[in-house]
Image (tube, rainbow, N blue to C red):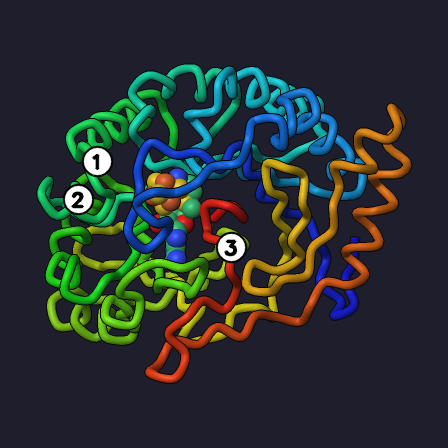
Amino acid sequence: MIDPFGRTITYLRLSVTDRCDLRCVYCMPEHMEFLPKSDVLSLEELLRLSGAFITLGVKKIRLTGGEPLVRRDVMTLIRALGQRIGAGQLDEVTLTTNGTQLGRFARDLAEAGVRRINVSMDSLNPTVFAQVTRGGDLGLVMDGIDKALAAGIAVKINTVALKGVNEGECHALVAWCGDRGVDLCFIETMPLGEVDDRLDRYLPLSEVRESLSKRWTLVDSSYTTGGPARYALVKETGARVGFITPMTHNFCEGCNRVRVTCTGTLFMCLGQEDAVDLRQPLRASEQDDLVRGAILEAIAHKPKGHDFLIDRDHQGPSVTRTMSMTGG
Ligand code: SAM
Ligand code: SF4
């Protein structure tokens, strides 16, 4: 799959549910309305859809959500995808998780062939963590991270930088991750969906980096996971720190991915409204020709990039759906 700008699409981010056991302030409103279950693809349909993408050249699948580990029987899907790695059809199956269920799932994930995961953790302070997630238990997440590491899964921590909330913690986070030998990636808040305080909370990562470089020796690194993060090696800890800067630096030129929601809507770009329904062609035929055709048609219209903006004149969302709907 090659898009109009010559980018080869090899990476699928698949949302398996829009539901979540947390309510992070930058991600969703407190009283989020979730989709009726009947709109959501079954696990069998998600697997079939993944298979269609694999035959079209996708080599890496990241499960996301909402919280992927709250989807009932999600291990069935993860195991089936893991078998595709064994069969040489996929290079990697991974997931982005809030970590609350990781303690229960770590061993199963490792056994299914998951080698690395991203865990979102925005604070090392239990009170701040509970505020950001509207009630989350930091201890549970940290225990989940320990269990994942013990099971042999590499962990990367994702932290959304939030002005006045966790900006004072960037050094502590670098140290905490360094102690455990895990990479840390800071993310700028993106204007997705209607949430409170976006302008007040937006913190450019240039400021985080500047602050970090006063205490740590950051050596620019060409390391990449194929994603938009730019990494530096922290000399003192030997771990990496990454910066995902959709707001201050447009990262679209190397984009190799598309996103599918749990209802089977294919979004060609996180920051644009362009979308194609795959559920209808998936359900219309037991063969995959229709759905494969719809995917190829969509890739032929993948936009060049997003145009996120947060300032006094642009306080609303660039797109109306939240990150939990598209899958982060
Ligand atoms: N629930 C899982 C989790 O939190 O890791 C997976 C889904 S979540 C939507 C994926 C990632 O998106 C998380 O790291 C979260 O912090 C990030 N995220 C959510 N809303 C965001 C926003 N408006 N701007 C930037 N990152 C956001
Ligand atoms: Fe849930 Fe992840 Fe969104 Fe937080 S960022 S509310 S954990 S989906």
Amino acid carrying mark 1 in the image: Gly
207 vs 115, left or right, is left
Amino acid carrying mark 3 in the image: Arg
Q: What x and y, as percent, mark residue 242?
A: 35, 59
Identify residue for label 1: 136
Q: Nearer the viewer, residue 233 or 251?
A: 251
In percent of the image, x 20 and y 27: which residue is there? Answer: 140
Q: CA distance from mark 2 to mark 3?
A: 24 Å
Disc on the earlier residue, 1 or 2: 2
How busy is the neighbourhood of tag 1: few (under 14 within 10 Å), some, or many (20 plus)?
many
Contact check, label 1 and label 2, Cβ < 8 Å? yes
In percent of the image, x 17 and y 56: which residue is there? Answer: 236
- Which of the two discs, 2 and 3, sits closer to the camera? 3
Disc on the earlier residue, 2 or 3: 2
Amino acid carrying mark 2 in the image: Phe
Mark 2 CB near ligand 2 (8 Å cut): no
Residue furthest to the bottom in view is: 313
Mark 1 CB near ligand 2 (8 Å cut): yes
Identify residue for label 3: 321
Q: What x and y, as percent, mark residue 256?
A: 64, 56
Identify residue for label 2: 129
Disc on the earlier residue, 3 or 1: 1
